[in-house]
Amino acid sequence: MTDANASRLDDYRFQMGHDAGNLAMALDQLTDALTALNQHTVYYRLEQGQRKAPPPDLVPLLGVLADAKLLVQESLLRLKGKE
């Protein structure tokens, strides 16, 4: 983990507690990964013209990341509700 990410994780843990801070950091990282993959789908072309769907090799990965992000969001909201 980079120093910047470690600092961000410490901030999240301080603000939200240890477990919720970890989930918040994971959520940020999942969001960053989804954003990078979606940018790739915009610029990646097999043939001339615009592609209307993500490249076939990225579809399963995008689905897994989106599902993981939903689970982290749900867990974070449940932790937040217990306080």
Image (cartoon, rainbow, N blue to C red):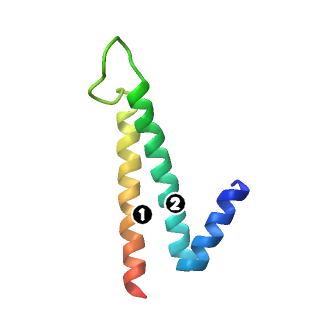
For disc 2, the marked residue is: 26
**Which mark identifies residue 24?**
none
Outermost residue, top direction? 48
For disc 1, the marked residue is: 72
Q: Whole-percent x and y of residue 71? A: 37, 62
Instruction: Count the marks.
Output: 2
Q: Please tell me whether residue 19 is drawn above or below residue 47 in the rendered image.
A: below
Name which residue type carries label 1. Val
Name which residue type carries label 2. Ala
Q: Please tell me whether residue 80 is drawn above or below residue 2 in the rendered image.
A: below
Residue 60: name its quadrant: top left
For the C terminus, the image quarter is: bottom left
In the picture provided, is 78 more to the left or to the right than 15? left
- Please rate how many residues cluster around mark 1, counting C-alpha atoms within 10 Å: few if below 14, some from 14 to 19, many from 20: many
Q: Whole-percent x and y of residue 67? A: 35, 53
Which of the two residues, 6 or 60, is positioned nearer the viewer here?
A: 6
Residue 47: name its quadrant: top left
Q: Whole-percent x and y of residue 24? A: 50, 66
Residue 9: name its quadrant: bottom right
Outermost residue, right direction? 3
- Please rate how many residues cluster around mark 2, counting C-alpha atoms within 10 Å: few if below 14, some from 14 to 19, many from 20: some
Q: Please tell me whether residue 22 is drawn above or below residue 26 in the rendered image.
A: below
Q: Whole-percent x and y of residue 26? A: 52, 60
**Mark 2, secondary structure of its residue:** helix
**Mark 1, secondary structure of its residue:** helix
Assess whether mark 2 and mark 1 are in contact (beta carbons under 8 angstroms).
yes
In the picture provided, is 11 more to the left or to the right than 57? right
Query: Which residue is at a point 61% across and 78% down the rendered structure image?
Result: 14
Which of the two residues, 1 or 7, is positioned nearer the viewer here?
A: 7
Query: Which residue is at a point 35% across and 27% down the rendered structure image?
Result: 56
Query: Which residue is at a point 42% across and 72% down the rendered structure image?
Result: 76
For the N terminus, the image quarter is: bottom right
